[in-house]
Image (cartoon, grey):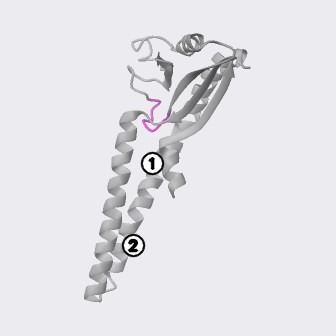
Amino acid sequence: MLKYITRVFWGERLEWNVSLKPEEVMRLVGSRNEGSWIERIFAPGIGASTGHRRFTLSKMSIGNIPMSANSFAHVLSGKVYETPTGSRVVAQFRLAIPVFIFGTIWLGLAFLIGVGGGVALLIKAASTRDIGHLNGAAAMFAAPIVGTGFLNFMRMVGCAENERELKVALTEALSRHSV
């Protein structure tokens, strides 16, 4: 179950070794930005933000809100390390921070309510000897499973294309300079 929970929040990890200095890598990653937010209102593209050897690529909708018609779509967040031969780029797909916070609260409450309610109904069934409460307990224990399933379903709906586009954008920027 932990595998299904963590894949909602974090995705594939990518690494490149390139012959460029970190500043040049950051310039290349920043060049993936497809215009200002006003230009992406009606023609959504990829947004790139860079700074302090860290970057984020996201599929944009309006403004700097990471969207691709699905807020559960991952952004590609990475860091550039200096190496003797140039740079090492490490990136990983993850949820946008506001969605990460929402998902954590949502799943936490689903587990708290589901397990707590299930235990309470089991105790009530044992104390009253009424097996009718067991159906309610089973439903309560199912809440975290349904919650996790919902988040995984939202990740699957339309997110694969979004992640593919971000991966291709970064690969195109770095592949010519790979060591």
Q: Position of residue 20 (x, y in %)?
A: 65, 12
Give, as a single range, the part of the protein colored magenta: 67-74
Residue pictured at 47% horizontal, 20% vertical: 44
Main SS class of the magenta portion in the image: loop
Residue 119 appears left or right of 153: left
Q: Which residue does the numbered mark 2 point to in the structure image?
A: 138
The disc at residue 151 is 1
Q: Residue furthest front?
A: 84
Outermost residue on the right side: it is: 179
Would residue 82 be visible to someone looking at this image?
yes
Please state which amino acid type lies under the numbered disc 2.
Ala
Which quadrant holds residue 90? top right
Compared with residue 8, is residue 37 higher up or lower down, i.e. above or below?
above
x then y, percent, for residue 146: 43, 58
Q: Residue at x 41, y 17 (%)?
A: 41
73 is within the stretch colored magenta: yes
Q: In which quadrant will I find the C terminus? A: top right
Crowding at label 2, few (<14), some or many (≥20) Cα neighbours within 10 Å?
some
| Mark 1 residue type | Leu
Whether residue 45 is visible here, answered yes or no, is: no
Quarter of the view holding residue 82: top right
Q: Are marks 1 and 2 in contact (CB under 8 Å)?
A: no
Viewer-side residue, 18 vs 13: 18
Tell which of 54 and 81 is nearer to you.
81
Q: What kind of element bears circle 1?
A: helix
In the visual, does 155 lie left or right of 171?
left
Query: Looking at the image, is 87 positioned above or below residue 157?
Result: above
**114 relative position to 88: left or right:** left
For mark 1, does the 10 Å Cα neighbourhood hold few (<14), some (14 to 19), or many (20 or more) residues? some
Q: Earlier in the sequence, mark 1 or mark 2?
A: 2
Q: Secondary structure at mark 2?
A: helix
C-alpha gap between disc 1 and disc 2: 21 Å
